[in-house]
Amino acid sequence: MGSTAIIQLLLVLGVALTVLSFLRNRNAMRFQAGKKLLFALFTLGCVASIVNPELLTRIANKVGVGRGADLVLYALVVAFAFVSLNTYLKFKDVEARMTLLARRLAIAQAVSERATSGVATERTEPRIPD
Amino acid sequence: MSQSGRTVPAGTWLIIPVYNEATVLAEVLQHVLSTFDGVICVDDGSSDASVAVIRGTAAHLVSHPVNLGQGAAIQTGIEYALRQPGARYFVTFDSDGQHRVEDALSMLELLAKDEVDIVFGSRFLDDRTKLPALKRAVLKLAVRYENATSGIRLSDAHNGLRAFNRKVAAALALKQSGMGHASEIVGKVSAGGFRYAEVPVEILYTQYSRSKGQSVLNSVNIVFDLLFR
């Protein structure tokens, strides 16, 4: 029972750290570097588990999981949460940039229209379909 | 020309975010333009006749090429208004006819005394506004949350009617493109140490504004947006 608690602790910590790291120093250089280090670690783990298939099961047993495959599944769930949040925030960032771009365009167009026509006209602009 | 003897302070600009409101927009604009000279409509990529309606009036039109959200539209309107010569006061006003010109005028009257930098409209300071019980409960909860997190005491949250001066307009720089901008404004007012006040306003819940208005469920989206900004 004592070793089952280890994996539970690790997984809860993993989820908590994922959310916390995104709430806090998201754009910090350290966080970006951390992502690359995690990826390097992941690659090394892959190679190690291919070369020595028993390794995963041994680690799994140490933290209280029956099979190595189960351990991989649990880690995958946490990793998926991490990737999802990362993608969501990336999209938000792109959206924010697009907003600035569209705003500048809209204001520039409004100013030039006002300057040339002086008053409202009947003309309608071609519009990018949604 | 103004209603009830109140005058509009010089340099006042009304900022109206518009998204697919063609059915009521003409009426709202006609009404608003009979009192205010400076009206800016920010079309947020409407796919209906909203743009044509705005072009048919004296209101300034700023048109987003794609739909970006109400917060983004308000920020665009503020930036456009700040470029207008002599602009001093800014009012955010909804395009669906749920705000009253009268209320905007009383807010501007208070603002023009220069005792506060921003005036928030509140539908909970008197009993004119009739709200469904669930909506009232959710809004009250939002108020409590905002008061607890921002250090500002307000009686209403997410009321679209506000009036503020140049200092606040220049400081807002809204990043919440969606509906999170209301909380963002409160946060910026708190962070900037601006002087604020509330004025009782009436929200006219017509059949139309009810059908277009924010669903109570949208509060889930707002909380999420504010958490992961």
Image (tube, coloured by chain):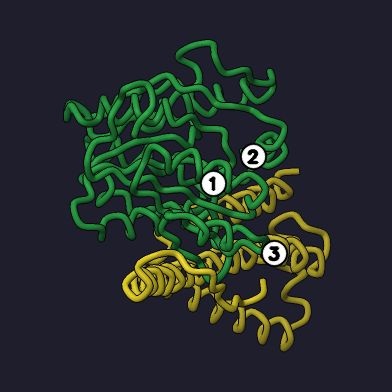
Q: Residue at x 58, y 48 (%)?
A: B26
Residue B81: % across, % down: 31, 55
Q: Circle 3 sits on which residue?
A: A75
Q: Circle 2 sits on which residue?
A: B214
Q: Which chain is green?
A: B
Label 1 neighbour load within 10 Å: few <14, some 14-19, many 20+: many
Asked if residue A30 can be seen in this view, the reply is: no
Front position among marks 1 and 3: 1
Q: Colour of chain A?
A: yellow
Mark 2 vs 3: CB contact within 8 A? no
Element under disc 3: helix
Label annotation for residue B179: 1
Residue B67: % across, % down: 58, 64
Nearer-N-terminus badge (2/1): 1
Element under disc 2: loop
Is label 1 on the same chain as label 3? no
| Up/down of A83 relative to B87, above or below | below
Decide which of B135, A88 is in the foreground and name it: B135
Residue A72: % across, % down: 75, 68
Spatial CA distance of label 2 from label 3 is 39 Å
Is label 2 on the same chain as label 3? no
